[in-house]
Image (cartoon, rainbow, N blue to C red):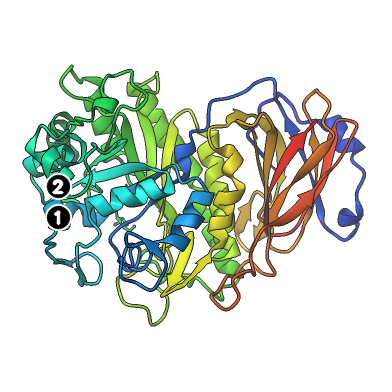
Amino acid sequence: MMMRNLVLASAPIALLAAFAPSAAAARGETAATVEIEAGQPGPKIDRHIFGQFAEHLGTGIYGGIWVGPDSKIPNVRGIRSDVVGALKAIKVPDVRWPGGCFADEYHWRNGVGPHRRSTVNANWGGSIEPDTFGTDEFMDFIHQIGSDAYVSVNVGSGTLEEASDWMAYMTADQRSSAGADRAANGHAEPYTVKYVGLGNESWGCGGNMRPQYYIDLMKRYARFTRNYNPAQQGDTNPNAMQRIAVGPTDDDAAYTEAVMEAWSKRDWSWSIEGLSLHSYTVPHWPPSLPSVGFGEDDYASILQATLTMEQKIAKHSAIMDKYDPDKKVALVVDEWGVWLAENPGSPKGFLQQQNSMRDAIVAALNFNIFARHADRVRMANIAQMINVLQSLILTDGPKMLLTPTYYIHQMYLPFQDATFVPVKFDAGEYRHGQVALPKIDAVAVKATDGKLYLSLVNLDPAAGSTVRVTLPQGRFGKANGQVLTAPNVNSVNTFEQPNTVTPRPIAGKVAGGVMTIDLPAKSVAMVALER
Ligand code: AHR
């Protein structure tokens, strides 16, 4: 039996002994216990762990967000309204743009003003990048969905002057030529740029740089990509721009060590506020596992791979603690998600894949890992928002569907800016062949609405679990929420059948300070505990 997240010294033996098997257990299903320790609240779970990533890649931007003002698809200034509505509903905290590898070949001037210059998107299928969706369109999109901008500047193939001019275009007022140019393009007020990425994967597609070479460059970008917006000035300003440096990939700590060591020796002239971690769930490279029609072998190996996020974050956090015990620099997991084989017949390099109930479980497990590391992981951006990799939304011309991963984001809304509440639980075991995984995962939070929420995940694809939750002291009388499950772990939503995987209500029984809930096989539940 695996014990996870142990907060108390010993297992609640008495509770285990007192547990009477329910009807579910009688059907051969298992039982689990969870104990909520509300007296020891943890850190705030930053809502930015639910951030998004939208790259100029395949139909992520063109078709997914941008249809143009003349399109028959309902839009506001070229940005499709159905997508905006869906994203507003999940309170997207930030969107990272324009890449990814694309960012290190992006030249922003091609995408502003009345005369756009098209280019070749060399990273992603050699498609033509029309540059009709540029800085002003991105900021309009961000504004329409009510989100923060996370702009990645081009360190790989651009110049420092170009990046610095871009910041001026976005944030300076009209007394400067850059601000006047922006005003002439239709936006008089400076934009708010909350986050700036100083390159992307500089150890790989961003220029394959030695850590020290990157650090020398990065210090200059950290200093000179200035934000001029009057509303973002001052170190203690909560709205001040945060600079995110390139950090590690997976468990390779070379960049973590080098960048954090450099940061620990910084002087007044530069700093960073975040270090990026990229880690995809991909058991074998290149990605070859199908996104539809897979069996339990693939299911178990993907879940096993995704759970290694825990060790990766722990490893990089420990290194960061060495140089930054006060946790000033955030670990920003700004690319994560399941990377599978491209849909058969889809354009090569567009990274189009379906999204299944299995991927919803992956999303929930990762959110739970980020929540457990909330003191260091203060932002994460799933790759990617629409039509690319582990998407929340798929579009096909005028059609749009919400994926199982979208619904996890919706169900986890109470986690945004909530306070982590420790839980102790016996995870049990789900075993398939050589793969042994915890069967149950659990995280509790005190949300900003004052309620206690419990996320429960059942990884077992075949057997449900009756979960008995010892509640903190206080009178809890109700336990209601939503559960996401599906006929199979490989169930997906399609344009023909968009509602195969959608949340439905679930309720627990509360009596004598204990909540009992029947968790279906392959499910994620989010339950509000109320007095
Ligand atoms: O998300 C797809 C690609 O994966 C990004 O462009 C790159 O940063 C990463 O390697």
Q: Is mark 2 on a helix, strand or loop?
A: helix
Residue 283: quarter of image: bottom left
Asked if disc 1 and disc 2 are in contact, CB closer than 8 Å, the reply is yes
Earlier in the chain: of badge 1 and badge 2, it is 1
User: Can residue 102 be seen at all in this image of the molecule?
Assistant: yes
Q: Residue at x 39, y 66 (%)?
A: 287
Image side of residue 367 versus residue 503, left or right: left
Residue drawn 31% across and 43% down? 150
Q: Which mark is residue 113?
A: 1
In the figure, 357 relative to 443: above or below?
below
Vertical side of 171 occupied by 97: above or below: below
Amino acid under disc 1: Gly
Q: How far apart are marks 1 and 2 (CA)?
A: 8 Å
Q: Which residue position is annotated with label 2? A: 184
Q: 432 and 381: which one is in front?
A: 381
Instruction: Name the quadrant of the C terminus.
Output: top right
Q: Quadrant of residue 168?
A: top left
Horizontal side of 249 relative to 511 (left or right) equals left
| Residue 179 picture location, percent across and down | 14, 38
The image position of residue 60, as x and y in percent, is: 35, 63
